[in-house]
Image: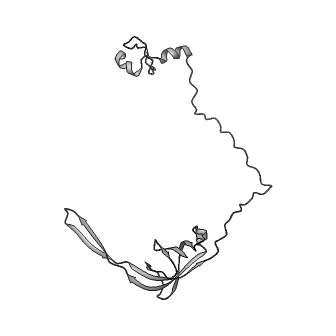
Amino acid sequence: MYAVIDSGGKQAKVEQGTILAVERLDAEVGTTVALPVLFASDGETIYATPAEAAGVSVSAEVLEHFKGEKQVVFKFKKRKGYKRTKGHRQVLTSVRVTDITLGAPAAKKVAKAEKPADAPAKAPKAEKPADSRAKAPKAEKPAAEVAESAMCAATKSDGSPCTNKAKDGSKYCGVHAKKYEA
Protein backbone atom coordinates (compact mmCIF):
# COMPACT_ATOMS: atom_id res chain seq x y z
CA MET A 1 0.00 0.00 0.00
CA TYR A 2 1.33 3.43 -0.94
CA ALA A 3 0.16 7.03 -1.29
CA VAL A 4 1.29 10.20 -3.01
CA ILE A 5 1.29 13.18 -0.65
CA ASP A 6 1.61 16.92 -1.27
CA SER A 7 3.69 19.03 1.09
CA GLY A 8 5.26 22.41 0.40
CA GLY A 9 4.26 22.35 -3.28
CA LYS A 10 6.14 19.09 -3.86
CA GLN A 11 4.81 15.55 -4.19
CA ALA A 12 6.29 12.40 -2.73
CA LYS A 13 5.42 8.71 -2.92
CA VAL A 14 5.33 7.24 0.58
CA GLU A 15 4.75 3.86 2.20
CA GLN A 16 4.46 2.95 5.86
CA GLY A 17 7.84 3.55 7.57
CA THR A 18 9.16 5.94 4.89
CA ILE A 19 11.35 8.78 6.18
CA LEU A 20 11.37 11.92 4.10
CA ALA A 21 12.27 15.60 4.31
CA VAL A 22 9.52 18.12 3.61
CA GLU A 23 9.44 21.89 3.89
CA ARG A 24 9.21 23.19 7.46
CA LEU A 25 6.03 22.11 9.27
CA ASP A 26 4.69 24.02 12.28
CA ALA A 27 4.73 21.06 14.64
CA GLU A 28 6.85 20.08 17.62
CA VAL A 29 9.30 17.18 17.42
CA GLY A 30 7.54 13.94 18.40
CA THR A 31 4.03 15.04 17.42
CA THR A 32 1.92 13.38 14.74
CA VAL A 33 0.78 15.34 11.68
CA ALA A 34 -1.66 14.53 8.88
CA LEU A 35 -0.35 14.99 5.34
CA PRO A 36 -2.64 15.83 2.39
CA VAL A 37 -3.18 12.88 0.01
CA LEU A 38 -3.41 13.18 -3.78
CA PHE A 39 -3.42 9.49 -4.71
CA ALA A 40 -3.44 6.13 -2.95
CA SER A 41 -3.43 2.46 -3.90
CA ASP A 42 -3.68 -0.76 -1.91
CA GLY A 43 -2.71 -3.05 -4.78
CA GLU A 44 -6.28 -3.70 -5.94
CA THR A 45 -8.11 -0.40 -5.58
CA ILE A 46 -6.90 3.00 -6.76
CA TYR A 47 -8.04 6.18 -5.02
CA ALA A 48 -7.23 8.90 -7.53
CA THR A 49 -10.05 11.44 -7.69
CA PRO A 50 -10.31 14.15 -5.02
CA ALA A 51 -13.54 12.59 -3.71
CA GLU A 52 -11.90 9.18 -3.31
CA ALA A 53 -8.65 10.58 -1.90
CA ALA A 54 -10.64 12.50 0.73
CA GLY A 55 -11.28 9.18 2.50
CA VAL A 56 -7.54 8.37 2.67
CA SER A 57 -5.34 9.71 5.46
CA VAL A 58 -1.58 9.62 5.94
CA SER A 59 -0.21 10.30 9.40
CA ALA A 60 3.46 10.98 10.06
CA GLU A 61 5.63 11.57 13.12
CA VAL A 62 7.89 14.64 13.18
CA LEU A 63 11.50 13.51 13.77
CA GLU A 64 13.51 16.74 13.56
CA HIS A 65 13.80 20.24 12.09
CA PHE A 66 17.00 20.99 10.18
CA LYS A 67 18.55 23.04 7.41
CA GLY A 68 19.21 21.50 4.01
CA GLU A 69 22.38 21.70 1.94
CA LYS A 70 23.64 25.13 0.98
CA GLN A 71 22.52 26.32 -2.44
CA VAL A 72 24.96 28.76 -4.07
CA VAL A 73 23.34 31.72 -5.84
CA PHE A 74 25.86 33.40 -8.17
CA LYS A 75 24.90 36.48 -10.18
CA PHE A 76 27.16 37.70 -12.97
CA LYS A 77 26.92 40.28 -15.75
CA LYS A 78 29.63 40.08 -18.38
CA ARG A 79 31.76 43.14 -19.13
CA LYS A 80 30.18 45.11 -16.26
CA GLY A 81 32.33 44.02 -13.33
CA TYR A 82 29.25 42.72 -11.51
CA LYS A 83 29.59 39.52 -9.47
CA ARG A 84 27.57 38.53 -6.40
CA THR A 85 27.71 35.27 -4.50
CA LYS A 86 25.05 34.39 -1.97
CA GLY A 87 23.93 31.18 -0.35
CA HIS A 88 20.64 29.78 0.85
CA ARG A 89 19.78 26.91 3.19
CA GLN A 90 16.15 25.77 3.18
CA VAL A 91 14.59 24.94 6.55
CA LEU A 92 13.23 21.37 6.40
CA THR A 93 11.37 18.91 8.62
CA SER A 94 12.13 15.20 8.70
CA VAL A 95 9.03 12.98 9.11
CA ARG A 96 8.40 9.22 9.32
CA VAL A 97 5.15 7.91 7.86
CA THR A 98 3.47 5.90 10.60
CA ASP A 99 0.12 4.98 9.07
CA ILE A 100 -1.80 5.03 5.78
CA THR A 101 -5.53 4.57 6.36
CA LEU A 102 -7.87 3.83 3.47
CA GLY A 103 -11.38 4.96 4.35
CA ALA A 104 -14.58 4.59 2.39
CA PRO A 105 -14.68 7.03 -0.51
CA ALA A 106 -17.24 9.80 -0.30
CA ALA A 107 -20.60 8.97 -1.90
CA LYS A 108 -21.04 10.48 -5.33
CA LYS A 109 -24.04 12.64 -6.11
CA VAL A 110 -25.69 10.96 -9.08
CA ALA A 111 -29.36 11.91 -8.82
CA LYS A 112 -30.30 15.25 -10.36
CA ALA A 113 -33.02 17.46 -8.98
CA GLU A 114 -36.24 16.90 -10.91
CA LYS A 115 -38.52 19.67 -12.08
CA PRO A 116 -41.88 19.88 -10.35
CA ALA A 117 -44.81 18.75 -12.51
CA ASP A 118 -46.63 22.07 -12.19
CA ALA A 119 -43.61 24.18 -13.23
CA PRO A 120 -44.35 26.53 -16.13
CA ALA A 121 -42.87 25.60 -19.48
CA LYS A 122 -40.37 27.93 -21.12
CA ALA A 123 -41.93 30.52 -23.38
CA PRO A 124 -40.80 30.48 -27.03
CA LYS A 125 -38.26 33.12 -27.95
CA ALA A 126 -39.67 36.31 -29.41
CA GLU A 127 -38.71 37.33 -32.93
CA LYS A 128 -36.19 40.11 -33.19
CA PRO A 129 -37.57 43.37 -34.54
CA ALA A 130 -36.29 44.40 -37.95
CA ASP A 131 -33.21 46.57 -37.75
CA SER A 132 -33.97 50.09 -38.96
CA ARG A 133 -30.34 50.53 -40.00
CA ALA A 134 -30.43 47.59 -42.38
CA LYS A 135 -29.29 48.34 -45.92
CA ALA A 136 -31.82 48.32 -48.71
CA PRO A 137 -31.22 45.66 -51.35
CA LYS A 138 -29.34 46.87 -54.43
CA ALA A 139 -31.16 47.17 -57.72
CA GLU A 140 -30.10 44.39 -60.04
CA LYS A 141 -28.92 44.98 -63.61
CA PRO A 142 -30.52 43.07 -66.48
CA ALA A 143 -28.78 39.74 -67.21
CA ALA A 144 -27.65 40.72 -70.73
CA GLU A 145 -26.00 43.91 -69.46
CA VAL A 146 -24.28 41.99 -66.63
CA ALA A 147 -22.88 39.43 -69.05
CA GLU A 148 -21.38 42.10 -71.35
CA SER A 149 -19.98 44.31 -68.60
CA ALA A 150 -18.65 41.41 -66.58
CA MET A 151 -16.20 40.32 -69.27
CA CYS A 152 -12.98 42.11 -70.25
CA ALA A 153 -13.20 43.92 -73.64
CA ALA A 154 -9.57 43.22 -74.60
CA THR A 155 -8.38 40.63 -77.08
CA LYS A 156 -5.36 38.44 -76.52
CA SER A 157 -2.35 38.36 -78.87
CA ASP A 158 -3.70 35.22 -80.56
CA GLY A 159 -6.97 37.04 -81.39
CA SER A 160 -9.22 35.31 -78.83
CA PRO A 161 -11.23 37.46 -76.40
CA CYS A 162 -10.04 37.78 -72.79
CA THR A 163 -12.12 35.63 -70.41
CA ASN A 164 -11.27 37.53 -67.22
CA LYS A 165 -13.86 39.49 -65.26
CA ALA A 166 -13.77 43.25 -65.79
CA LYS A 167 -12.95 45.54 -62.85
CA ASP A 168 -15.64 47.74 -61.32
CA GLY A 169 -15.95 51.00 -63.27
CA SER A 170 -13.82 49.72 -66.17
CA LYS A 171 -14.37 47.59 -69.25
CA TYR A 172 -10.98 45.84 -68.81
CA CYS A 173 -9.69 43.26 -66.31
CA GLY A 174 -6.74 43.94 -63.97
CA VAL A 175 -4.26 42.56 -66.51
CA HIS A 176 -5.37 44.68 -69.48
CA ALA A 177 -6.46 47.84 -67.65
CA LYS A 178 -2.86 49.00 -67.35
CA LYS A 179 -2.22 48.48 -71.03
CA TYR A 180 -5.38 50.03 -72.55
CA GLU A 181 -6.42 52.70 -70.02
CA ALA A 182 -3.03 54.20 -69.29
Residue 87 visible to an observer of this rendering: yes
The N terminus sits in image quarter: bottom right
Image side of residue 41 versus residue 69, left or right: right
| The quadrant where residue 76 appears | bottom left
Q: Position of residue 170 (x, y in %)?
A: 43, 18
The location of residue 15, given as percent across then percent down, is 51, 78
Residue found at the far front of this picture: 43
The residue located at (23%, 69%) in the rendering is 83
Measuring 37% from the left and 77% from the top, which residue is drawn there? Answer: 90
Q: How many labels does the image show?
A: 0
Displayed quadrant of residue 125: top right
Horizontal and vertical percent for residue 12? 47, 73
Q: Which residue lies furthest to the top in this view?
A: 159
Q: What color scheme is it? A: one colour
Judge left or right: residue 127 versus residue 59: right
Which percent across, then down, holds residue 144? 54, 13
Q: Is residue 110 above or below residue 148?
A: below
Task: Pick the residue in front: 1 or 83.
Answer: 1
Task: Name the residue: 41% across, 80% down.
Answer: 92
Q: Looking at the figure, which quarter contains the C terminus?
A: top left
- Residue 142 at least partly seen: no
Q: Residue lying at the far right in this picture: please name it.
A: 118
Left or right, 181 with respect to 132, comes to left
Answer left or right for 77 relative to 149: left
Question: For the view shown, which residue lies furthest in the bottom direction?
Answer: 30
Of the pair 109 and 176, the residue shown nearer to us: 109
